[in-house]
C-alpha cells in the first residue's frame, strides 16, 4: 500500500497548505504499541481470554484510565478486575519494556527534514509524564527538535482522544498563532484520527497493518510507512532525494 485518497502526485495542487506539524507518539514516532499488546495479552490470558485487534483499536491512543475502563468492560471483567487493578498489574511490565523502544521507519528522516526547513513541530501523546520519560530516554535528540510536547495528563487536556483537546492545546502553544487548517497531524490510532478531525486539522494515518481497514476512514491520507510520506503533497518543502 503506498497511499490512498485524491491527489497523489506531488506536482498536483497540494491537499492543503500546511505550516505546522503535530506528531502522535506511541505507534507513530516510537514503536511502543507492541508492548501494550504483549502485556494486555498476558493479563487477559489469566482469564482464558484472547486480546484481539478490535479491542486494540478501541484502546489505542486513549489516556491510560480511559483505555483501562474499555479493557475491563469489553472483556467482561467487571467484578474480577477493576480498571485501577489493571493499570497496576501492567505497570511494572510496561516500565521494564518502554526504555527499549525504537523509532519507527522514516521518523528520523522526516523530523530532521522538517526541522532543517524550519517547519514547527510538536508532539501530542495520550501518554502521561512518567511513561513519556521512560519511552523517550533514548530518543532525546529527536524530541529536542520539537517546539513542545503535550501529554495526556496536561491540565488543558480535559478529555483524551477522540476529543480534540490535545491537538488544540498543541496548536495553541506554537508561537505566532496558527489555524487548525494549517496543521497536519500524524496518527496511528482511530481515536487519534478522529481527534485531529474534530480539531479541524488534516491527518495522515500510519496504521499498524493488522488494524482493520474499516478504521482507516476519516483519515485524509493513509500510508503504510512514514517513508512513503511526500511533504510537497501538503504544501511542505519536498525531500531532496
Ligand atoms: O498514541 P499516543 O502517543 O497518543 O499514546 C497513547 C497511549 O499511551 C498508548 O496507546
Ligand atoms: Mg498513537
Image (cartoon, rainbow, N blue to C red):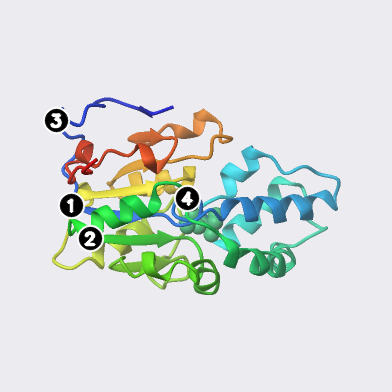
In the structure shown, which secondary structural element does the residue marked by tag 1 occupy? loop
Of labels 3 and 4, earlier in sequence is 3
Left or right: where 130 falls relative to 176 = right
The image quadrant where one finds the C terminus is top left
Q: What residue does disc 4 label? A: 104
Of labels 1 and 3, earlier in sequence is 3
Identify the residue at horizontal 58%, vertical 67% (top origin): 99
Of labels 1 and 2, earlier in sequence is 1
Of labels 4 and 1, earlier in sequence is 1
Tell me whether the residue at label 3 lies in contact with that at label 4, contact meaning CB atoms closer than 8 angstroms.
Answer: no
Identify the residue at horizontal 82%, vertical 49% (top origin): 45
Tell me whether the residue at label 2 lies in contact with that at label 4, contact meaning CB atoms closer than 8 angstroms.
Answer: no
User: Residue 19 has which mark?
Assistant: 1
The image shows residue 128 at horizontal and vertical percentages of 51, 69
Q: CA distance from mark 3 to mark 2?
A: 22 Å
In the structure shown, which secondary structural element does the residue marked by tag 2 occupy? loop
Amino acid at each position: 500500500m503506498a497511499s490512498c485518497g485524491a491527489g497523489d502526485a506531488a506536482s498536483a495542487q497540494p491537499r492543503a497548505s500546511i505550516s505546522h506539524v503535530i506528531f502522535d507518539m506511541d505507534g507513530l514516532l516510537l514503536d511502543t504499541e507492541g508492548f501494550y499488546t504483549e502485556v494486555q495479552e498476558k493479563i487477559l490470558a489469566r482469564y482464558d481470554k484472547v486480546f484481539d485487534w478490535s479491542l486494540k483499536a478501541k484502546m489505542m491512543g486513549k489516556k491510560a484510565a480511559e483505555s483501562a475502563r474499555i479493557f475491563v468492560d469489553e472483556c467482561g471483567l467487571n467484578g474480577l478486575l477493576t480498571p485501577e487493578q489493571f493499570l497496576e498489574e501492567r505497570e511494572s511490565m510496561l516500565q521494564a519494556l518502554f526504555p527499549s523502544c525504537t523509532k519507527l521507519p522514516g521518523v528520523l528522516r522526516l523530523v530532521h527534514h522538517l526541522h532543517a526547513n524550519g517547519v514547527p513541530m510538536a508532539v501530542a501523546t495520550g501518554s502521561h509524564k512518567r511513561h513519556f520519560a521512560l519511552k523517550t530516554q533514548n530518543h532525546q535528540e529527536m524530541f529536542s527538535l520539537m517546539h513542545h510536547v503535550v501529554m495526556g495528563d496536561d491540565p488543558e487536556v480535559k478529555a483524551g482522544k477522540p476529543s480534540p483537546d490535545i491537538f488544540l492545546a498543541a496548536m495553541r502553544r506554537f508561537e505566532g498563532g496558527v489555524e487548525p487548517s494549517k496543521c497536519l497531524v500524524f496518527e496511528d490510532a482511530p481515536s487519534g484520527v478522529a481527534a485531529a478531525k474534530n480539531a479541524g486539522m488534516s491527518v495522515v494515518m500510519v496504521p499498524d497493518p493488522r488494524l482493520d481497514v474499516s478504521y482507516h476512514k476519516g483519515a485524509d491520507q493513509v500510508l503504510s510507512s512514514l517513508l512513503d510520506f511526500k511533504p510537497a503533497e501538503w504544501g511542505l518543502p519536498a525531500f531532496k532525494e
